[in-house]
Structures are given as C-alpha cells and as structure tokens.
Amino acid sequence: MRSILMVLVLVVLMALQSPIFGLLGIRASLLDLPLIATLYLAGSSRALRGFVASAFVGLVADAFTPGGLLGMNAEIHGILFLLALGLAARFPLTRPVPLVLVTAVSSVLKTLLFYLFSILFDRAFEPRVEVLLWGLPTALATAVLAPLLFLPFAGVDRMVQGRRPTESLLR
C-alpha cells in the first residue's frame, strides 16, 4: 500500500510540475522527481520492496519521457536504488547535507547511465556532448531542493505508517 501511494504521489507531482513550470517559462524536467522518489525509497524501504517500487518509479519516468525507450528509466532507477541503498546504510539520507551530496552524485550518474544506455540501445540517438550538459542544471536544481522534495514522500509515510526515519525533515 505504501509503495503504491508513493508512486501515486510521484505521478501527481510530475503531472503538476509540467504545466506549472511551463507557465513560468522553465524547462518542465528541471527537477528530477523520480530520482528523489528512488532515493527516498532507498533510505526508508526494505531492499526487495524498495527495488520493485523504484522500478515502477522508473516506469512512471518513462511514461513522462516523450520519445524515450520504454523501460530504460526503470533499469536506471533499479541500479540507482541499489547504489543508494548502500549509501543509505553509511550516510543518513534524513539529514540535508548527506542528502544533497548523494542526490548530486546520483543525478550525475543517472545522466551518464541514460547517455550510455541511449548509445547502446536507441538507434535513433545521436551522441552529442550537449545531452550530457543538459543534465547539469537538473542535477544542481534537484540536489539543492532535495530536502524539500523529500517532504511529500515523508508525508505519505507519516500518513500510512506513523513515525518514519525521515521525520526529522518534517520538524
């Protein structure tokens, strides 16, 4: 139930992000909300349940990516979940500084994986450096706003299960 609500919150946030950013003249994909959801799941879920939920988060990201290959983001989010799960064991993702650092590294890694997988699996993809540079503003904005972007997911946890490890972000 919790994982389904997390994915539904992500869908709502992504559906709201596109028109609001469009009205403001900002690129609709400036914030990487699926990455935030994956990192939140890594910091607050058990391994198997979180991995499956992260794969669904990737499928949601695929649905919001026009012209992308179906399943590529699901693979990337699965890989990022496993890496973030290891980092969450060492760094408390409930604290802002470790969260910002892990988000920045994960965002850059996601951009590199997306570029690599596009080269390998997408015949229509033209490898250009601009594609890699396009991910830098997204990585920066997502990392800086990560503690605030964790709040809707922590709210779902609070609503469904009561106390969670991310409760310190809600104070």
Image (cartoon, helix red, strand yellow):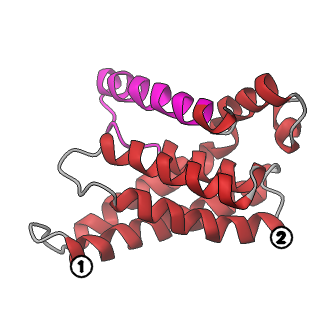
Distance, label 2 to label 1, CA atoms, is 33 Å
Q: Is residue 7 above or below residue 53?
A: above
Q: Main secondary structure of the magenta part?
A: helix
Up the image or down, 118 lies above or below 71; here it is below
Residue drawn at point x = 17 percent, y = 69 percent: 122
Q: Foreground residue, 73 or 26?
A: 73
Q: Nearer the viewer, mark 2 or mark 1?
A: 1
Residue 63 numbered mark, or none? none
Residue 162 lies in quadrant: top right
The residue located at (39%, 26%) in the rendering is 15
Q: Position of residue 82 (x, y in %)?
A: 63, 68
Q: Is residue 54 left or right of residue 49?
A: left
Q: Percent from the top left, x then y, of residue 113?
A: 40, 72
Q: Amino acid at mark 1?
A: Leu
Residues shaded magenta: 5-31
Closer to the camera in the image, 128 or 11: 11
Q: Which residue is mark 2?
A: 90
User: Mark 2: which amino acid?
Assistant: Arg
Q: Nearer the viewer, residue 75 or 103?
A: 75
Q: Position of residue 171 (x, y in %)?
A: 88, 29
Q: Does 72 sit above or below residue 21?
A: below
Element type at mark 2: helix
Of helix, strand and loop, which one carries label 1? helix
Circle 1 sits on which residue? 120
Q: Position of residue 149 (x, y in %)?
A: 62, 37
Q: Are the residues flagged by discs 2 and 1 in contact, CB closer than 8 Å?
A: no
